[in-house]
């Protein structure tokens, strides 16, 4: 769905919250440690994950406490993002077979706002109902 973004303002964690919350039919629920989970139709599409032993700092062995999970449309898209050495995305064995990519909050600024917006829109589209997704695509002139 996305086109090659032009380089613009660096993204921030506040942009993640703003963009995700602005998508239609979104609710924000609190995870087990009051971490925000953005959902459409009770399906998560972006969430701030609690620290887990599967994503750790290679130098200290401490779990990352700033991981954000974004759904993606397909495994091919996931592989494209995590294998692109110019992008800050990663995955862990815990997410094998799961259509999502991980991003540390401290690295959000490696994306520009347009790239982040497209990532979140794609995440929303991958979890929204077919009817909601088609309506949003039509509203934005992106329907087939």
Image (cartoon, rainbow, N blue to C red):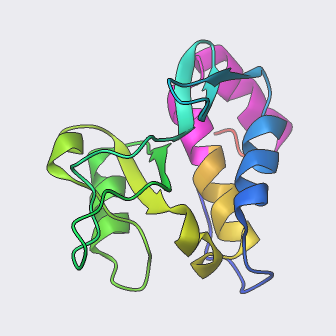
Asked if residue 141 lies left or right of residue 50, the reply is: right
> For residue 136, what is the image quadrant?
top right
Considering the image in quadrants, where does the N terminus appear? bottom right
Task: Determine whether, in the image, residue 10 is placed left or right of residue 29.
Answer: right
Residue for point 62% across, 69% down: 3
Q: Is residue 1 above or below residue 57?
A: above
Confirm whether the magenta stretch covers residue 94. Answer: no
> How far across and how far down the image is residue 11, in percent?
72, 71
Magenta-highlighted residues: 122-141
User: Can you say whether 47 is above or below 106 in the image?
Assistant: above
Please indicate whether residue 136 sits to the left or right of residue 76 in the image. right
Find residue 73 and report its image quarter.
top left
Rendered residue at 77%/58% (across/down):
15
Quadrant that contains the C terminus: top right
Residue 131 lies within the magenta run = yes
Q: Where does the image place residue 12, in percent across and percent down from the top left?
A: 73, 67
Relative depth, front residue between 123 and 140: 123
Q: How many marks?
A: 0
40 or 122: which is nearer to us?
Answer: 40
Residue at the image position 58 percent from the left and 80 percent from the top: 110
Left or right of 31? Residue 82 is: left
- Whether residue 141 is visible, yes or no, is no
At which x and y percent is residue 115?
Answer: 64, 68
**Residue 119 appears in the picture as rendered:** yes
The residue under the point 72% across, 46% down is 142
Q: Main secondary structure of the magenta part?
A: helix
x%, y% of residue 78? 33, 55
């Amino acid at each position: 769905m996305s086109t090659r973004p032009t380089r613009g303002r660096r993204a921030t964690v506040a942009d993640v919250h703003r963009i995700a919350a602005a998508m239609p039919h979104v609710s924000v629920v609190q995870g087990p440690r009051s971490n925000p989970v953005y959902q459409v139709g009770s399906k998560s599409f972006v969430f701030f994950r609690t620290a887990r032993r599967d994503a750790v700092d290679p130098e200290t062995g401490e779990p990352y406490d700033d991981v954000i999970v974004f759904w993606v449309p397909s495994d091919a898209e996931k592989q494209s993002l995590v294998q692109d050495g110019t992008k800050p995305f990663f995955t862990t064995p815990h997410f094998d077979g799961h259509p999502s990519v991980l991003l540390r909050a401290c690295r959000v600024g490696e994306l520009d706002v347009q790239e982040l917006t497209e990532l979140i829109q794609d995440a929303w589209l991958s979890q929204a109902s077919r009817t909601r997704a088609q309506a949003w695509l039509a509203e934005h002139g992106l329907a087939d």
